[in-house]
Structure formats: C-alpha cells, structure tokens
C-alpha cells in the first residue's frame, strides 16, 4: 500500500512539474517582444533603431512588399527577426500602426515598418552609427526610414 501511495505521489509531482514548465514556457513566449524605437542622428534626423539602438535600414529591391535580401546579402544586412508569438512594440516616435512582419525566405519572420522589411548593417557596431545609409550594395540601395515610414535619402 505504501508503495502505491509513493508511486501516486511521484506521478502527481511529475504532472505538477510538467504543468508548471508548460505554463512558464507559455508566459515566456507571451512576454517576448521586439522593440522598434527612434534616435535622432546628425544629418539624417529621427530614424528607426532596434532595441540595442542600432540603425535600421530598408532595401529598395524589397519594393515595400517582401524580403529579398537573403544568403550573402543577409550576412551583411541581418534582418530584424521576430518570433511568431512575439509582440511588436513601438517606442519613441515609432508608430505601432506601421509595425508588422513578413515571411523570411530563410525561415521565420522579419519585422516590417510601413511594409518595408527592416535590416541592420554589420559595419554599424554601436548606437548612433549609420554607415549603411545611401549605400548601393548587395543589389540595391539602402536607406533609413523616418518614424512616418518615409525613406530618408540624405547622404551623411
């Protein structure tokens, strides 16, 4: 009889552990988020940045429709990725209504702003840099976006 009670207690404990783990995983997934914010840069004005303060760019060949920077291009211009269950958050002057996401041909999803997929640039290693601005590289031009979702074509 004691052995049966011990087994029942063990099963109940395992079930509690499983339920707790699943609930915790659900909470973590529900609270994950991607933050798009703004920063004022010299000569460019207010532009979009990621949660680390790195400048975000749009790629003209995307034509405000879909991600076209893949493979070698994406190694130089990493897309701003978002998990399917993640929440998109606009801070600063960024507008929540302009945030979205599109499928990434390499898998997953990419954050969009005014339908433009967003990317960082590997040469921007700290906040406030915009070394990718107005570059014609990897098959097209790269520009920053204003909080209104407009392309800023100024060369720094």
Image (cartoon, rainbow, N blue to C red):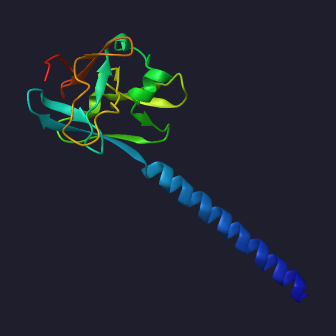
In the picture provided, is 108 more to the left or to the right than 143?
A: right
Circle count: 0
In the picture provided, is 132 more to the left or to the right than 69?
A: left
User: In this view of the protein, which residue sits in the foreground, 58 or 27?
Assistant: 58
Vertical placement of 4 versus 107: above or below? below
Vertical placement of 35 versus 13: above or below? above
- The x, y position of residue 150, in whole percent, is 20, 19
In the picture provided, is 107 more to the left or to the right than 58?
A: right
Q: Quadrant of the C terminus?
A: top left
- The x, y position of residue 66, in whole percent, is 42, 16
In the picture provided, is 122 more to the left or to the right than 25?
A: left
**Farthest residue, direction right:** 1
- The x, y position of residue 104, in whole percent, is 49, 25
User: In this view of the protein, which residue sits in the foreground, 114 or 16?
Assistant: 114
Say which residue appears at 52% left-offset and 31% top-offset: 108
Say which residue appears at 12% left-offset and 26% top-offset: 44
Q: Quadrant of the N terminus?
A: bottom right
Say which residue appears at 23% left-offset and 28% top-offset: 131
Asked if one can make out residue 71 in the rendered structure from this viewpoint, the answer is yes
- The x, y position of residue 149, in whole percent, is 22, 23
Asked if one can make out residue 70 in the rendered structure from this viewpoint, the answer is no
**The quarter of the displayed image where residue 46 is located:** top left
Say which residue appears at 22% left-offset and 23% top-offset: 133
**The quarter of the displayed image where residue 98 is located:** top left
**Farthest residue, direction bottom:** 2
User: In this view of the protein, which residue sits in the foreground, 136 or 65?
Assistant: 136
**The quarter of the displayed image where residue 87 is located:** top left
């Amino acid at each position: 009889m004691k052995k049966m009670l011990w087994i029942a207690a063990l099963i109940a404990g395992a079930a509690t552990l499983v339920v707790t783990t699943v609930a915790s995983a659900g909470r973590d997934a529900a609270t994950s988020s991607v933050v798009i914010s703004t920063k004022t840069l010299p000569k460019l004005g207010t532009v979009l940045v990621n949660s680390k303060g790195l400048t975000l760019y749009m790629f003209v060949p995307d034509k405000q429709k879909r991600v076209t920077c893949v493979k070698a291009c994406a190694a130089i211009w990493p897309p701003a990725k978002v998990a399917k269950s993640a929440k998109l958050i606009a801070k600063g002057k960024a507008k929540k209504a302009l945030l979205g996401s599109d499928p990434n041909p390499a898998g997953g999803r990419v954050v969009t702003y005014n339908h433009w997929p967003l990317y960082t640039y590997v040469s921007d290693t700290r906040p406030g840099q915009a070394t990718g601005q107005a570059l014609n590289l990897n098959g097209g031009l790269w520009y920053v976006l204003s909080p209104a979702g407009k392309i800023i074509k100024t060369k720094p």
